Image: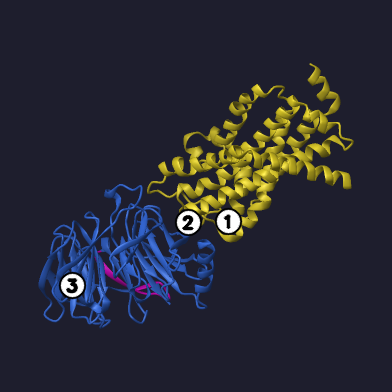
Chain colours: A blue, B yellow
Amino acid sequence: MKHALALAATLCAAPALADEIWVSNEKDDTLSVIDIETLEVVRTIEVGERPRGITFSKDYSVLYICASDSDAVQVMDPETGEILHDLPSGEDPEQFVLHPNNRHLYIANEDDAITTVVDTETREVIAQIDVGIEPEGMAVSPDGKIAITTSETTNMAHWIDTETRELFANTLVDSRPRHAEFIKGGSELWVSSEIGGTITVFDVATQAEKAKINFDVKGVHPDRVQPVGFEFSAEEATAFVALGPSNHVAAVNPETYEVEEYILVGRRVWHMEFNADRSLLFTTNGVSGDVTVIDVASREPVKTIKVGRFPWGAAFRP
Amino acid sequence: MKAALTALRAIVIREALRFVRQRSRFVAALVRPLVWLVVFAAGFRAALGLSITPPYQTYITYEIYIVPGLCGMILLFNGMQSSLSLVYDREMGSMRLLLTSPLPRWWLLICRLLASTVISVLQVYTFLIVAALYGIDFPLMGYLYALPALIVGGVMLGALGLALSSTIKQLENFAGVMNFVIFPMFFLSSALYPLWKMAESSVLLRDICAANPFTDAVELIRFALYGAFNAPALGWTVLAGAVFIGLALWGYDPARGMKRQKG
């Protein structure tokens, strides 16, 4: 019954215009473009070396790509697939986040222990902020006032004031923080810890720890349960957390902080992206080299689509 | 024609009554696949989903993979069980009574085959209901599409049982059937592991599994449960069924059969 509903929901959810999910393939140096209607790869585009984080500008006119081994953030015209220019990014950019002003890109430079702020219009570095060792996760609050960098080795979330571009707080989290997101209108910050196997929830006003979410996938050794990327469904009703080599995505209730369900996907799931109405979730499964599509309403995986080697990041484009 | 249908009805009812009255047989038929599902499959649950092979569109747990194979297991065991009861009938004399009917012998045997298939299919659906309660369900239409697949598979395996029963003289010899037919057929098939997994250990093993008609029956059911059609599996199952029916009719041929009885 659940399957039938899932299938029906998937068919109903298919929009008239072909929306796309863009996926970066870390080992192939390519991007795979998935047509959301047909759930098939329609384009593969070559990019710089080791593409990881990808994000579109707010108007979807350009795509920013962290080409980690090219030490550059590439700017692509998504229509033609052409690289327009590179942005100065500092060494080994891994993840970034676009400020709500659609202009400033906050980039985590994994090898340099800094966060670089780049102006995408003037193409200049406007600030470099010292953070912990191996910065990775990046987030900006909805009002644009706070930026977060998580450092994998220092095991901290660094709170950056975007006006002064200085750190105003550092909070400890569990081992190897990978991803950060603001929710509830920017009043809460979630940080995932890959080795610690947890998500730490902070109260943004006080920077105090508010809750900790633990995961326990039946039949999987706890060491393999490694939360990395996470995304929130429409109206933040459910948080979907990618649990790395446990090959499962957890559905978490953001009110109770309880895990409600575990969904089987491909091997070593890291990041995720939704379609326009957030009815479908696309997970990047690094080791198995594919993307699993989850029907959000039924929480059932409906299809797994082969992409390039080691898919890493994903971004939606209408 | 009317007499033929009366015979069919009588034989189906007799089998159904026998099945209903032997409650332990019903429970055993249900418990066997459930033990595999709950105990055996649980051990293989693990983190890894099975690689994606048609008809699956995404990764699945082992528990989901094994269910169509267990449906096949019910058909296989039931097919053999009915052959066992044929041997019993023969020992008790009711077989002789049945075969002295004025209706053609082939028709009586087909009736017997259909009766055992009806019982098998009922058992499979009972198992599928329990599996759904356990949390392993299929698309709603899949349950409907599975019906013809289960009938074809059930007839093929029932015919095998019928053909075997013509060669077994005594009830005691049934253990041989168990060891030399049921187990190899079940284990050397795609019921428990996908064929690509078999190929990892031995290509020969994979080829044996691929040649096993039980594999085709299981794949036919597997595809049908997801609303998909597997033409080669249907072709091979029907072909194997026709061969087994031919062998059964030959085995129960009066001239030949009686000679064997005397011998």
- Horizontal side of residue B108 vs A104, given as left or right: right
- Cα–Cα span, label 1 and label 2: 12 Å
Using the rendered image of the protein, determine whether residue B100 is visible from the camera's viewpoint.
Answer: yes
Residue depicted at 89% across the width and 36% down the height: B102
Residue depicted at 44% across the width and 41% down the height: B39
| 1 and 2 marks in contact (CB < 8 Å) | no
Position of A144 relative to B208 (above/below): below
Which element is circle 3 on? Answer: strand
Marked residue chain, label 3? A
The foreground one among A76 and B230 is B230
The foreground one among A298 and A18 is A298
The residue indicated by pointer 1 is B226
Q: Within 10 Å of the Cα at label 2, are there few (<14), some (14-19), or many (20+) other Cα atoms?
A: many
Using the rendered image of the protein, determine whether residue A88 is visible from the camera's viewpoint.
Answer: no
| 2 and 3 marks in contact (CB < 8 Å) | no
Residue type at the position of mark 3: Asp
| Residue A18 percent across, percent down from the top left | 49, 75
Label 1 vs label 2, nearer the camera = 1
The residue indicated by pointer 2 is B58
Label 2 vs label 3, nearer the camera = 3
Q: Which residues are magenta?
A: A71-83
- Horizontal side of residue B214 vs A63, given as left or right: right
Position of B250 relative to B145 (above/below): above
Q: Within 10 Å of the Cα at label 1, are there few (<14), some (14-19), or many (20+) other Cα atoms?
A: many
| Residue B235 percent across, percent down from the top left | 70, 46
The residue indicated by pointer 3 is A203
- Cα–Cα span, label 2 and label 3: 38 Å
